[in-house]
Image (spheres, rainbow, N blue to C red):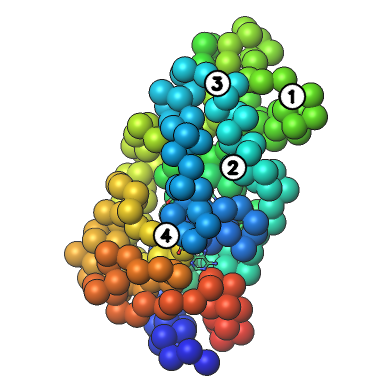
């Protein structure tokens, strides 16, 4: 087995208060593309512009069309081995929190309970006029079937916006505060599938390190935090999680 994988597993075995910080890379093996990995979505600036807060305000229908094009698999994706590995560690009482930049809800589907979605979720939404809460899942199915865009509030006819933090939006401060608390309290921060280029999420490894935690990064590409990590695993998360599940 790859030595870095073995070292990371050993650190996980020795740790008692693990926090995970996941990014889009943990869901690529579920068929949801990432932004900055190989073949990621970053290469299409026009689509990315539509996924911003100002893009949504300008043309909500185009926003939904772009979202459906970018993430065709989002509504039927299933958790990966890496998602299941974190749920397994939480069940063992070793994980104090899963901080995720993802909006796909796959950690909860895998069984993780203490999840901090710092960029929100695509599963719920709110009316931009009256503020009514909306379950987005049946709406997406309708959007794909009937092509009726954008979805409108059944109470007031306002446009529904999914509860995701778009480019130009600020992460929900209460959720981010909790994520910081978890990063401060962990003895190991396990970064899984993140380029660590998006702030303020990318501040969290530094916060954990300042509080004395060890840092393990599992990512296919280099990150700026690699020199500060105790172990860097350059492997597919599926392979890492498969090996780690067998030993924890
Ligand atoms: P990112 O796209 O910037 O980086 C993903 C990283 O994961 C890359 O460095 C890539 O090399 C690595 N990676 C990809 N597949 C991997 C695999 N199988 N094993 C190991 N590593 C793998 O992702 P980010 O840092 O999360 O930032 C992107 C932003 O876009 C986030 O804010 C996130 O909210 C959002 N986003 C979310 C989803 C989702 O919910 N699934 C998908 C795309 C983007």
In depth, the one of 50 and 114 nearer the eye is 50
Please give left or right for residue 110 compared with residue 216 in the image.
right
Mark 2 to mark 1 CA distance (whole Å): 16 Å
Indicate which disc, 1 or 4, sits on the residue closer to the N terminus: 1
Q: Which quadrant does the C terminus fall into?
A: bottom right
Of badges 4 and 2, nearer the viewer stands 2
Check residue 194 in the rendering and tell me which mark sits there, or answer none: 4
Pointer 2 residue: 70
Compared with 87, 48 (above or below) is above
Closer to us: 158 or 172: 158
Mark 3 lies on residue: 60
Q: Which comes before the other along the chain, label 3 or label 4?
A: 3
Q: Is residue 6 left or right of residue 80?
A: left
Position of 7 relative to 45 (above/below): below
Q: Residue at x 63, y 25 (%)?
A: 134
Q: Is mark 2 within 8 Å of ligand 1?
A: yes
Residue 232 placement (x, y as % from top left)? 37, 77
Q: Position of residue 110 (x, y in %)?
A: 64, 59
Q: Image quarter for residue 96?
A: bottom left
Question: Could you say which disc has been placed on residue 147 in the image?
Answer: 1
**Marks 3/2: CA–CA distance:** 15 Å
Regarding residue 113, the answer to whether it shows in the image is no
Q: Is residue 154 left or right of residue 55?
A: right
Q: Nearer the viewer, mark 1 or mark 4?
A: 1
- Alpha-carbon span between mark 3 and mark 1: 13 Å
Q: Secondary structure at mark 3?
A: helix
């Amino acid at each position: 087995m790859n030595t870095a994988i073995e070292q990371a597993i050993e650190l996980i075995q020795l740790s008692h208060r693990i926090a995970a910080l996941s990014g889009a890379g943990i869901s690529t093996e579920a068929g949801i593309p990432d932004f900055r990995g190989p073949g990621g979505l970053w290469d299409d600036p026009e689509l990315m512009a539509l996924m911003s807060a100002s893009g949504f305000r300008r043309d909500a229908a185009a926003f939904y069309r772009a979202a459906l094009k970018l993430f065709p698999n989002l509504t039927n994706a299933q958790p990966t081995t890496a998602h299941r590995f974190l749920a397994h560690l939480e069940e063992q009482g070793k994980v104090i929190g899963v901080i995720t930049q993802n909006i796909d809800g796959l950690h909860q589907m895998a069984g993780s309970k203490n999840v901090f979605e710092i960029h929100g979720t695509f599963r719920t939404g709110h009316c931009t006029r009256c503020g009514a809460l909306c379950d987005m899942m049946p709406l997406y199915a309708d959007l794909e079937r009937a092509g009726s865009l954008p979805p409108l509030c059944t109470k007031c006819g306002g446009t529904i916006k999914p509860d995701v933090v778009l480019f130009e939006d600020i992460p929900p401060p209460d959720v981010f505060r909790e994520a910081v608390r978890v990063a401060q309290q962990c003895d190991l921060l396990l970064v899984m599938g993140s380029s660590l280029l998006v702030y303020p999420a990318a501040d969290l490894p530094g916060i954990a390190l300042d509080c004395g935690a060890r840092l393990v990064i599992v990512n296919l590409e280099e990150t700026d935090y690699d020199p500060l990590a105790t172990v860097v695993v350059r492997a597919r998360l599926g392979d890492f999680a498969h090996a780690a599940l067998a030993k924890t």
